[in-house]
Amino acid sequence: VSPVSSMRAWARTMKPGARLFILGTTDRQGAQAARNAEPRAAYNAMCRAFCDATPGAVFIDVDALIPAGEFFDSDHYTRKGYFQIAQFINANATSDPVSAAAE
């Protein structure tokens, strides 16, 4: 099962007006991202394209949303980093989605 087919399945189960948040991954912060920047960038591009094509789907660009100092490592964030993700989701849960970079 491909990631995109899984995302399509999630989208089909959404109630009208609901949002589907897809969390991206960093390809800039930490040692793991440095070793795997290309597949991480490809994952982000795939998720962004899915969200652009799917009503109600919202891509969370962690590199645009979370300042560099709020990454614990390539896959985890500080409390402030997680809080910024939560604030983004709360701000977009019932409104028209905005770009993470615009926050």
Image: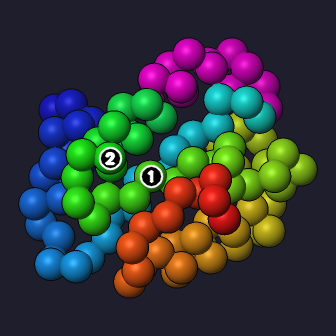
The structure residue drawn at horizontal position 32% and vertical position 70%, both measured from the top left corner, is 19
Q: CA distance from mark 1 to mark 2?
A: 8 Å
> Which residue is at the front of the view, 44 or 32?
44
Q: Is residue 72 visible?
A: no
Q: Provide the major secondary structure of the magenta segment.
A: helix
**Magenta segment includes 8:** no
Q: Which residue is mark 1?
A: 59
**Magenta segment includes 38:** yes
- Vertical side of 102 occupied by 80: above or below: below
Identify which amino acid the numbered label 1 is placed on.
Phe
What residue range appears in magenta?
30-43
Q: Is residue 17 visible?
A: yes
The mark lying in front, picked from 1 and 2, is 2
Mark count: 2
Residue found at the far right of this picture: 69
Place of residue 35 in the rendered image (x, y in percent of width and height, measured from the top left): 69, 16
Q: Residues within 10 Å of mark 2 (few under 14, many from 20)?
A: few
The structure residue drawn at horizontal position 73% and vertical position 54%, both measured from the top left corner, is 66
| Residue 52: mark in rendering | 2
Are the residues at dot 1 and dot 2 in contact (C-beta closer than 8 Å)? yes
Place of residue 98 in the rendered image (x, y in percent of width and height, measured from the top left): 49, 64
Place of residue 78 in the rendered image (x, y in percent of width and height, measured from the top left): 80, 60
| Residue 26: mark in rendering | none
The structure residue drawn at horizontal position 66% and vertical position 65%, both measured from the top left corner, is 103
> Which residue is at the front of the view, 49 or 24?
49
